[in-house]
Image: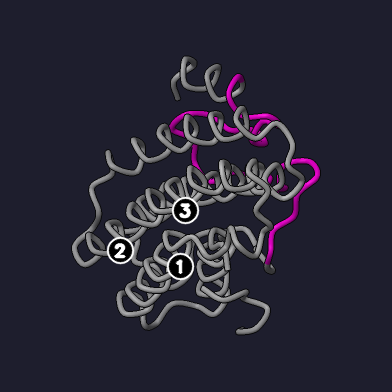
């Protein structure tokens, strides 16, 4: 998705995440509900006007709310992990370690998303998000050696998996719009910006 400003409980997993992500994700716990605090990791910022999911998810049927809550928690945490590794990439700081931490966190998040049973009509949405996660991991796996070999960020952003991930996020957004045509503007804006903030472009 192009920059959106242009458009409108397991203790083991918790301990592991604290070890692998530096700085840690704010208040992350395995199996958590959507967090009250969505502050980005220290030294980073969201690339668009991300707002927390609104209380009660107006316009989302009650039967779907638990899934949306959990899935967008995963999307938020994947976004925060992306911000940390992207900062390391841009500054050329501790790149191999940053990549390893990112990949480990993303595998945890991908496993959590894969365990979700999507409500009827959202299976393709979930597939899009899963594909976007995998493509972004592939993007960063290629980006780190490029940067270590002296490539600038313009060259890094030419890695095709970055654009491919973006296309899957566009598709995920389209599927959400189709599924919830009567949702509130507040809900739609928040969900759009979650997907936008995850994007690389």
Q: Residue at horizontal 43%, vertical 32%?
A: 31
Q: Which stretch did the figure color magenta?
A: 19-47
Instruction: Say how the picture is coloured.
Output: one colour
Q: CA distance from mark 1 to mark 3?
A: 21 Å
Estimate the x, y position of residue 78 in percent, counting from the top left: 52, 46
- Dot 1 falls on a residue whose secondary structure is helix
The residue positioned farthest toward the left in the image shown: 120
Which residue is label 2 attached to? 125
Q: Residue at horizontal 67%, vertical 36%?
A: 26
- Contact (CB < 8 A) between labels 1 and 2? no
Task: Specify which label sits upstream in the sequence, 1 or 2.
Answer: 2
The label on residue 163 is 1
The verdict on residue 42 being magenta is yes
Q: Nearer the viewer, residue 139 or 183?
A: 139
Q: CA distance from mark 1 to mark 2?
A: 18 Å
Q: Residue at horizontal 45%, vertical 67%?
A: 163
How many numbered discs, if any? Answer: 3
Residue density around tag 3, few if under 14, some if 14–19, many if 20 or more, within 10 Å: some
The label on residue 138 is none
- Dot 3 falls on a residue whose secondary structure is helix
- Contact (CB < 8 A) between labels 2 and 3? no
In this rendering, which labeled residue sits more in front, label 2 or label 3? 2
Residue density around tag 1, few if under 14, some if 14–19, many if 20 or more, within 10 Å: many
Q: Is residue 100 above or below residue 169?
A: above
The label on residue 72 is 3
Estimate the x, y position of residue 137 in percent, counting from the top left: 45, 45
Q: Nearer the viewer, residue 2 or 59?
A: 2
């Amino acid at each position: 998705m192009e920059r959106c400003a242009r458009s409108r409980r397991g203790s083991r997993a918790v301990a592991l995440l604290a070890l692998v992500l530096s700085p840690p994700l704010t208040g992350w716990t395995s199996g958590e509900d959507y967090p009250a605090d969505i502050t980005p990791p220290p030294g980073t910022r969201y690339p668009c006007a991300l707002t927390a999911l609104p209380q009660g998810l107006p316009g989302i049927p009650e039967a779907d709310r638990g899934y949306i809550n959990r899935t967008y928690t995963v999307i938020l945490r994947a976004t925060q992990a992306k911000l940390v590794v992207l900062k390391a990439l841009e500054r050329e700081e501790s790149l191999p370690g940053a990549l390893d931490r990112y990949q480990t966190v993303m595998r945890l998040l991908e496993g959590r998303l894969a365990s979700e049973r999507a409500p009827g009509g959202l299976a393709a949405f979930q597939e899009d998000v899963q594909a976007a996660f995998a493509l972004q991991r592939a993007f960063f796996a290629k980006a780190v050696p490029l940067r270590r070999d002296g490539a600038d960020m313009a060259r890094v952003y030419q890695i095709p998996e970055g654009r491919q991930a973006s296309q899957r996020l566009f598709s995920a957004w389209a599927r959400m719009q189709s599924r919830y045509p009567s949702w509130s503007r507040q809900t739609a804006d928040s969900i759009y910006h979650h997907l936008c903030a995850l994007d690389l472009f």
